[in-house]
Image (cartoon, rainbow, N blue to C red):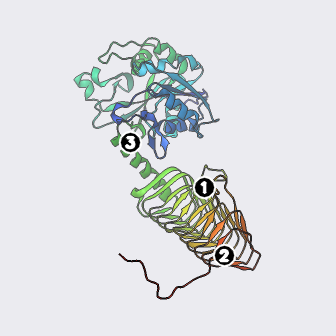
């Protein structure tokens, strides 16, 4: 990095995000910045980075699909209430300089403006902090990188160490095209100077557009130092212009996250076969097999083991629990009553499904092809095969037989089933809610219950068996 970055900066930071482009090469009706990477839209990644910078305000420049982009960010929980979010529209789109010109009415003169792109999702906050430090409130700071093949990028033209200009590919001479240091599209600039330079832009270039990069020559002319903060990590400045590039960045993101998890002590069977689409917090000695997907907010306690091909969303799994292969856990919103909780030492799966509102106590067993929804199971309860528990409260040590279900819906309303401690439910039973099975009771296999049962009672509710000897089936 060149230039003086040792000054202590006290200026507030205002972030500008360019998100007006159509993204033709995505070949999609969805605005480019709303395509997802790791479970969040591209532009949301950039807004989250602005939040990490403690930005005073974020101004998003929209254009193509403006309503969709603005609605998506307005409803996003991760930016709600944390910073001031502004929107300005660029219509028509006449270049990057024209885009940033639209922000002038909402930018304050006392700030440092950090210009980001809504399709460059993996820039890290600490990199931007270094760029802001390089700006120091009185310099134009550019984020740059060396590329072996710099085709398509604006070249950084220097005289000695001092940056003199950014020359776009189509306007560059043959000699300038051989320069490998390129501009990333990210800059930090004092707001007051930025406004004056934006007013001087013109479109006298090969593209007929207003280039934001032309402010470099204005800064040089005005005697304002132009400094470059050069990084080596290409992923931080990589943009998304096609599905291929989106997939490449997805893998880069997941590889980086997998490495962080392993450095924290998580055992990954294959770091190339992990997908985290949200937040994954792991305690000590967690192991995760291949092809697992984690969505929303997931917390894995000490010693948790997750088998292959599991999908886990918005769940807290306590120490020592085992999630066997092909289990699907789908909690509701994080922090709500619908988030799934799995108790210490529980055994789940294989091929189990835990739906929103499931709360499982310690040492609960949920076996293959068992579905649980909006139900609580107390310590030691078991439903080991082919069963459904919906809107149920299940006591300690209950054994819930194969093929049994709670009939919780009457066509209009949901009703609750209460199964008290130490109850044994036989196979293929139907418990028609609302109903309470008294503590210590037993329900015979094949029973359909519509009434409460007394504690310790044996309850059988099925038709009497009839056998007709020597019965002949109909034949053609």
Q: Which residue is mark 3?
A: 246
Quick one: SS at disc 2? loop
Mark 2: give few (<14), some (14-19) or many (20+) Cα within 10 Å: some
Q: Which residue is mark 1?
A: 356
Q: Is residue 10 left or right of residue 34?
A: right
Which circle marks residue 461 in the picture?
Answer: 2
Residue in the foreground of this view, choosing between 372 and 301: 372
Write the residue at 50% across / 63% down. 327
The x and y percentages for residue 4 are 49, 28
Q: Earlier in the sequence, mark 1 or mark 2?
A: 1
The x and y percentages for residue 145 are 37, 35
Up/down of 381 relative to 392, above or below:
below
Q: Is residue 351 left or right of residue 208?
A: right
Residue 187 seen anywhere in this rendered image of the structure: no
Q: Earlier in the sequence, mark 3 or mark 2?
A: 3
The x and y percentages for residue 467 are 54, 85
Write the residue at 45% across / 21% down. 99
Give the foreground label among 3 and 1.
1
Write the residue at 72% across / 73% down. 421
């Amino acid at each position: 990095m060149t230039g003086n970055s040792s000054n202590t900066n006290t200026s507030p930071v205002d972030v500008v995000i360019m998100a007006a482009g159509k993204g033709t090469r995505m070949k999609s009706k969805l605005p480019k910045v709303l395509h997802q990477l790791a479970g969040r839209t591209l532009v949301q990644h950039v807004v989250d980075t602005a939040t990490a910078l403690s930005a005073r305000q974020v101004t998003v420049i929209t254009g193509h699909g403006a309503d969709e982009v603005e609605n998506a960010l307005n409803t996003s929980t991760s930016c709600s209430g944390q910073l001031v979010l502004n929107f300005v529209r660029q219509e028509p789109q006449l270049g990057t300089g024209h885009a940033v010109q639209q922000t002038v009415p909402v930018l304050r003169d006392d700030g440092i403006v950090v210009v980001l792109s809504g399709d460059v999702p993996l820039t890290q906050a600490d990199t931007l902090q270094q760029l802001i430090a390089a700006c120091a409130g009185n310099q134009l700071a550019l984020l740059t990188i060396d590329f072996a093949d710099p085709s398509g990028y604006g070249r950084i033209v220097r005289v000695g160490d001092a940056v003199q200009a950014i020359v776009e590919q189509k306007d560059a001479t043959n000699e300038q095209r051989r320069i490998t240091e390129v501009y990333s599209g990210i800059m930090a600039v004092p707001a007051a100077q930025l406004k004056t330079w934006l007013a001087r832009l013109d479109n006298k270039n090969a593209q007929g557009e207003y280039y934001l990069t032309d402010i470099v020559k204005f800064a040089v002319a005005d005697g304002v130092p132009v400094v470059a903060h050069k990084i080596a990590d290409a992923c931080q400045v990589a943009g998304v212009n096609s599905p291929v590039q989106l997939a490449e960045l997805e893998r880069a993101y997941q590889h980086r996250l997998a490495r962080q998890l392993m450095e924290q002590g998580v055992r990954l069977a294959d770091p190339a076969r992990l997908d985290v689409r949200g937040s994954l917090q792991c305690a000590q000695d967690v192991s995760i097999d291949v092809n697992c997907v984690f969505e929303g907010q997931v917390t894995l306690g000490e010693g948790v083991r997750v088998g292959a091909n599991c999908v886990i969303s918005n769940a807290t799994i306590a120490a020592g629990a085992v999630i066997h292969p092909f289990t699907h856990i789908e909690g509701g919103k994080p922090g709500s009553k619908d988030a799934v909780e799995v108790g210490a030492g529980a055994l789940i799966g294989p091929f189990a499904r835990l739906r929103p509102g499931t709360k499982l106590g310690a040492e609960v067993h949920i076996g293959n092809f068992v579905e649980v929804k909006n139900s609580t199971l107390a310590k030691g309860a078991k439903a080991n095969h082919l069963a459904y528990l919906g809107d149920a409260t299940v006591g300690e040590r209950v054994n819930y037989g194969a093929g049994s279900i709670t009939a919780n819906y009457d066509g209009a309303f949901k009703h609750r089933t209460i199964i008290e401690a130490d109850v044994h439910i036989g196979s293929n039973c139907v418990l028609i809610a609302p109903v309470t099975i008294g503590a210590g009771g037993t329900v015979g296999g094949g029973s359909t219950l519509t009434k409460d049962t007394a504690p310790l009672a044996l309850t059988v509710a099925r038709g009497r068996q009839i056998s007709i000897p020597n019965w002949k089936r109909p034949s053609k």
